[in-house]
Structures are given as C-alpha cells and as structure tokens.
Image: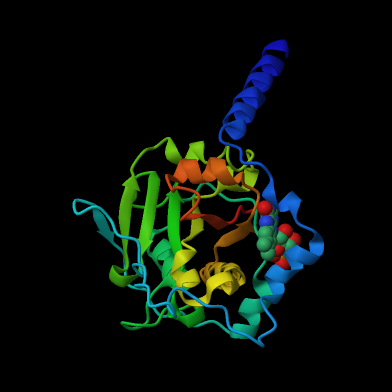
Amino acid sequence: MRLLLRISALLVCACATLLAEDSPARPLDAFSYDQLRMFLKGYNGDWRPQSDREKGLPAPPATKSSPSNARRIALPKPAARSVDFKTLLESRRSVREFSMEPLPLADLAFLLWAAQGMVDTNFHTAPSAGGRYPLETYISAANVGGLKPGIYRYEPATHSLVVIDENPKSPEKLLAPCYGERTVAGAAAVLIWTATPYRTEWKYAFTAHRMIAMEAGHACQNALLAATALGLGACPLLSYHQSAIDKWLGVDGREEFVIYLAAVGQPARN
Ligand SMILES: Cc1cc2nc3c(=O)[nH]c(=O)nc-3n(C[C@H](O)[C@H](O)[C@H](O)COP(=O)(O)O)c2cc1C
C-alpha cells in the first residue's frame, strides 16, 4: 500500500513538473468578461478591419508543408454510408469508455475525411470562413489497424497521412498534457486539431479568431457524426494543458497551436 502511494506521489510530481515547464502566464485573466465577450461578437460591422490582404501583403501558404522526405500513407477512400440523418443526430453521444478492439484504418480515414477532407479541388467537407482553412488535423494513433502507434498528420489534398513520429511511446505521452484523462487513455486514436491563425487573420484581421474557433467546432462535429454513423464511440475534449500539448505535438504554440481534441474508439460493451 505504502509502495503504491509512493508511486502515485511520484507520478503526480512528474505530471506537475511536465506541466509547470513553459507554463505561460494566464493572459486571459487580464481581460474582463465584457472584453472576452467581444471575441464572440466580432465587430459591429460599421467599419472594416484593415487586413494584410487589403494592404497587399502576400497570402500565407494555404496548407502546412512537409519535409521533402516525409513519408505518406495512403488512406482508403471514404466509402458511401447510408444512415437516417435524424437517427444519426439522436444517437450521437459523448462516449468515454472504449474496448481494446483496434480502430480499422478505413474508419479512421472516413473520420478524417468527414472532419477536413476535400470533396473537389477547392472545397472541403467542413465550411471555412473565406475558404482559408486554418486547421490541421493530427492523429495520435494508439490502436489503429495497420498503423504503427505514433503521431500522424492528415493531408486533405492527397487523402493520406504524413508520418510525424512513429513512436510507440507517443500516444501514452499524450496522457500527461491531458491530465491523465481516462477517455484519452482508453481511446484507439485521438484526433487533434491545430489552428494556424495567420491563414485567416491575413484576410479577416482581428475578426479571424472567432471564425477559427467556430471552424474547429464544425470539423469536430463532422468527425463525431461520422463516428456515430460507423458505430464508433467519440468524445470531444478540451481538458489539456496548452503549452504541454503543443510541445508534445512539436508545434510552436504561436503560429500553430492545439485548439480541440476528439477521442475515438470502439465503444466498450457492457
Ligand atoms: C467544447 C467542448 C469541450 C468538451 N470537453 C470535454 C472534456 O474535456 N472531457 C469530457 O469528458 N467531455 C467533454 N465534452 C463533452 C461534453 O461533456 C458533452 O458534450 C456533454 O456532457 C453533453 O453530452 P453529449 O455529448 O453526449 O450530448 C466537451 C464538449 C464540448 C462541446
């Protein structure tokens, strides 16, 4: 018993140390609720913010580039699924307990396509303000058929996965930034959306940020409904430590940072 307590204390210390590292000040504390609500309102509309686009500055790259030697894994094409839409909406529930069964790669492919996939050369399954598409979708794969555990990035244009880090330790290392959340511990995969704000700021200046938050909601809801259609369980998550998860993913936390997560897997059968 004493040994168990000692191990738990050590684990808590390890988590606290990890989370304390690079912890930013809490800048949101500096704003009043009225100021924070402005984020939701945007602006009154009786004047236009001067964006970098209007100033004639070049557009930032529309997508994240990968090193020339990056390895890609082609994904199965999204297959047609026919489900009654009302039943689909009624049956979506946040699922937090998963079985040990792997997530088939074809199911992961369908979820990713539903979240951010392309339907033709210009348009994606989810809407994006001004067609700026500021989100990237990463996958922490713990138990996906045919994939080594690790971190991958979905590339909508090629409907493939870019291998970021085929490291069996990566999925379990995600647990500390997620405060040990059991939903993350049991999931076959966690979808991770990052925002690259300047893609939208370039066109919409300071009104961009609420658009980006809305778009993360669109992407995640598409993935949740797709999971429901496939008989999978999924749960949206915001319980993560911002700088710790950005560090885990290897993004800089300023030009690109994590904005939303969804844990996915085969639901536990009771
Ligand atoms: C923005 C957002 C963040 C959420 N974060 C978490 C979370 O961190 N952990 C969790 O267990 N559920 C989380 N949820 C799921 C909600 O708890 C859940 O949607 C709510 O209880 C309603 O249940 P339902 O999704 O089954 O309809 C989140 C939902 C939203 C929309």
Residue 143: x percent and y percent?
Answer: 44, 47
116 or 81: nearer the viewer: 116
Position of residue 17 relative to residue 254, above or below, is above
Ligand 1 location (quadrant)? bottom right
Q: How many discs mark residues in the rendered view?
A: 0
Q: Is residue 207 left or right of residue 135?
A: right
User: Quadrant of the rendered structure where residue 26 is?
Assistant: top right
Residue 221: x percent and y percent?
Answer: 58, 71
Position of residue 172 relative to residue 69, above or below, is above
Q: Farthest residue to the right: give it.
A: 33
Q: Tell me the residue at 35%/82% (across/down).
A: 122
70 or 200: nearer the viewer: 200
Q: Farthest residue to the left: give it.
A: 69
Q: Farthest residue to the front: give it.
A: 55
Q: Tell me the residue at 35%/61% (across/down).
A: 64
Residue 72: x percent and y percent?
Answer: 25, 57
Q: Tell me the residue at 64%/54% (across/down).
A: 238
Q: Tell me the residue at 49%/58% (across/down).
A: 194
Residue 55: x percent and y percent?
Answer: 43, 77
Q: Farthest residue to the top: give it.
A: 2
Position of residue 235 relative to residue 4, above or below, is below
Q: Is residue 225 visible?
A: no
102 or 136: nearer the viewer: 136
The quadrant of the image that shows the N terminus is top right
